Amino acid sequence: MSTDHELDPTTTTAALAQAARTAGYAPSIHNTQPWRWRVRARSLELRAERGRQLAVTDPSGRLLTVSCGTALHHVRLALAAEGWAAEVYRLPDGADPDLLARLTLTGRTEVTPAAMRLLQTVRIRRTDRRPVSESPVSGTALEGIRHAVTAEGARVHYLRPEDVVELASAADHARTVEAMDPTWTDEMSYWIGLPREDGLGVPAAAIPSEPPSTMVPNRDFGHGGALPVGPSHDRAAVYAILYGDADSAMGWLRGGEALSAAWLSAIELDLTLLPLSAAVEVPGTRQALRRILSGVGEPYLVLRLGAADPEHAGPPHTPRLPADQVVEIVDRG
Ligand SMILES: Cc1cc2nc3c(=O)[nH]c(=O)nc-3n(C[C@H](O)[C@H](O)[C@H](O)COP(=O)(O)O)c2cc1C
């Protein structure tokens, strides 16, 4: 039951703006943070920021929309952990495809310990591109991740060893195809590894100083990074494909929400999760992923899961845009 005070516009606007600021911690392709939040007295709009879409790597906006989905899941979690109930309308206006979601506050709700725990993982989460530890990933943990994904309307397929070989070959081919395209390498160099102060892109400090020994190669970052990797191999990692029914904006958005839910759950389970998108970016290798899925769905992203290495401190946090560049209060009621 909500009191008038709790639903007064000053309180609700502040709660929505705070949740949108928390969503700034969400992961995004090349750390492009391709979203913009519009805060109104009782509702919040998530808009795609096409100015930060990767025109060469992601012409259809698939990875932009998956990235926005991770931010949407973060905002939903931030509201739930503060005791706010919200209704979510995804792609609510067919005439305005950049309006990805509208959330409307409906009142107060009980805060669950699960939501509070998961919110704590938001600030800890970061992309770790180094090999994982030698410890195996338990079946129980994989079931936990599967549960987190399906609860968000997407699905996950864990790969058998023979499929990992096929995935490695697809990922390797995607690297080669992309590296041969000078427009692609230009786009990559703009976003990755350069010193910059605008809070965008992936800093050299988060990129391995040499290619790590992994079963499936990550994208070719073009220039070496500054993150020491050590001699370990990721033999104990589990590779997976995050997928869904449709290769559409709705599917990608739900896929992004599922990615966020899986990643935050992985942290709770002492696992690391690394998204790998190169094989999804190239049409031919995306087709290879469909084959690995035996045609049961549309691939959104490859995931690597592994036990966190207790010897390793995490890589540094990747910077973010200042909140006032992504969160706009348009109406305080
Ligand atoms: C849709 C999507 C695709 C991504 N693809 C890759 C990838 O192929 N390789 C990689 O190393 N990181 C990938 N990332 C991780 C981003 O680079 C990372 O989230 C971003 O730089 C922000 O850093 P943080 O996750 O440490 O906060 C991806 C993230 C998302 C959301």
Image (cartoon, rainbow, N blue to C red):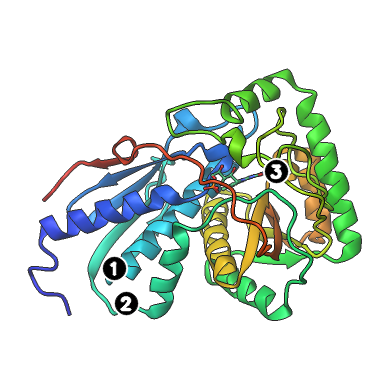
> What residue is disc 2 on?
111
- Percent from the top left, x then y, of residue 314? 59, 54
Q: Amino acid at mark 1?
A: Glu
Q: How many marks?
A: 3
User: Is residue 45 in sight in this rendering?
Assistant: yes
Circle 1 residues within 10 Å: few <14, some 14–19, many ≥20: some
- In this rendering, the label closer to the viewer, 3 or 2: 3
Q: Which mark is residue 82?
A: 1
Report the quarter where the N terminus lies. bottom left
Rendered-image quarter of ligand 1: top right
Q: Amino acid at mark 2?
A: Val
Mark 1: is the Cβ under 8 angstroms from ligand 1? no
Residue at 53% x, 33% y: name it.
201
> Residue 106: which quarter of the image?
bottom left
- Percent from the top left, x then y, of residue 44? 29, 52
Circle 3 residues within 10 Å: few <14, some 14–19, many ≥20: some
Relative height, residue 97 to residue 51 (above, below): below
User: Is residue 244 in sight in this rendering?
Assistant: no
Q: Residue furthest left?
A: 4
Residue at 75% x, 54% y: name it.
131
Q: Are marks 1 and 2 in contact (CB under 8 Å)?
A: yes
> Residue 116: which quarter of the image?
bottom left
Circle 2 residues within 10 Å: few <14, some 14–19, many ≥20: some
Relative height, residue 10 to residue 325 (above, below): below
Q: Which mark is residue 228?
A: 3
For numbered disc 3, what is the local secondary structure?
Answer: loop
Q: Amino acid at mark 3?
A: Pro
Sooner in the amino-acid sequence: mark 3 or mark 2: 2
Q: Rounded to the nearest whole Å, what is the CA distance between mark 1 and mark 2?
A: 7 Å
Q: Are marks 3 and 2 in contact (CB under 8 Å)?
A: no
Residue at 70% x, 43% y: name it.
228
Sooner in the amino-acid sequence: mark 3 or mark 1: 1
